[in-house]
Amino acid sequence: MLLSAASFYCLAFVCGYALSPKSVAEYSQNLTAQTDYNESHADDVYESAAHKASEEASVITKSEVAAATDGKAKGKIVNRTIDSSAANLKYQRIYIKNGTGLSIDLKTELLTPPKLKIESTKNPQVLIVHTHSTECYMSEERGYYTDTDLTRTTNKSQNITAVGDVLKSALDKKNINTVHATEYHDYPEYSGSYGRAEKTIKKYLEKYPTIKVVIDLHRDSVTDENGTKSALVTEINGKKAAQVMLVSGCQSGSVTGFPNWRENFRLALRLQQTMEVMYPTLARPILFTPRKYNQHLTTGSLLIECGTEANTLEQAKYSAELLADALASTLNMLK
């Protein structure tokens, strides 16, 4: 059984570990696991048989262990591609993992466009933020990870903010003026990250009232019960890219105060469909879940997971370029 970070939040092993560091170095080593139910991603269990993941099995050999001069090999890394068979809701190249219990008519949702309108202007239209700013990646591609491979770091050239830089630059080049917020929200304390991110988002929305789309950019984590980590990889134009996943929250059950969630959902549907048309296999099925993730703050909110901690930074950066292509195309259709 494979568990993504989406389920690990509720199982005390999510997108890294609890952070109560005495120093940045201790923080980066991810010393302790914690459960944070208020900030959890929705439960999302991917069974290998269910999504027919392609796997390049890796065995840690003695020579590889010997080559791990910077640390002790702890477990395997395998390459997987999560395809559309992981979805339980499908329509016209839109694939969704519906964990809400809500009945969704995708045809109707597609016939109703989002209300947001992108303008041809030099004013900011998009905000990129990172609730978990210190999430990072492997520095190189290999079949194992060691006790010195970081899953979090405050080095902005190595963590998720570096991927955000690529996304911003690519959107700017497509005349979609973008603001990139690189503030830390999960350091020095992890608990309360979404609350701090909410304050940051509100600050930028007040400063730039022309912002229509808010992207909370993360990286995921997929680890099985044996400690094997999955790098979610696909090949686009002959180059390896980290798979991306849109997470779309909604109001359901105990989740209230989120009446306009369908606006975000409709944007996510169109973006996922565009990615599937432009770059098949880049996008995993949308995770549709009864949670907020600060998406209640705007009607153009997107939470995007770019790869896992077992992907390389270069794979994630390449995915950001492809994501920018698809997002720009999607937003231009909403002018």
Image (cartoon, rainbow, N blue to C red):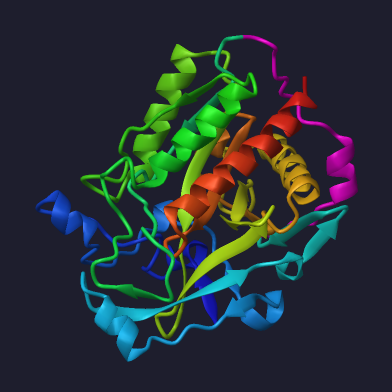
* Nearer the observer, 209 or 93: 93
Q: Is residue 62 above or below residue 161?
A: below
Left or right of 160, for residue 126: right
Left or right of 310, for residue 264: right
In the rendered image, residue 220 lying in the magenta stretch gets the answer no
Residue at screen point 88% across, 52% down: 92
Q: Which residues are magenta?
A: 100-121
Dominant secondary structure (helix, strand or loop) of the stretch shown in magenta: loop
Left or right of 188, for residue 51: right
In the rendered image, residue 119 lying in the magenta stretch gets the answer yes
* Nearer the observer, 206 or 60: 60
* Nearer the observer, 76 or 39: 76
Residue at screen point 23% across, 78% down: 72
Q: Is residue 216 above or below residue 148?
A: above
Q: Is residue 101 visible?
A: no
Location of residue 264 in the rendering, given as x and y in whole percent from the top left corner: 67, 37
Residue 204, picture quadrant: top left
Location of residue 181 in the rendering, given as x and y in whole percent from the top left corner: 40, 29
Residue at screen point 21% across, 73% down: 69
Q: Is residue 66 above or below residue 85?
A: below
Residue at screen point 34% across, 64% down: 35
Location of residue 74 in the rendering, given as x and y in whole percent from the top left corner: 30, 80
The quarter of the rendered structure image containing the N terminus is bottom right
Residue with the most extreme left position: 22
Location of residue 78 in the rendering, given as x and y in whole percent from the top left corner: 50, 76
Q: Is residue 220 visible?
A: yes
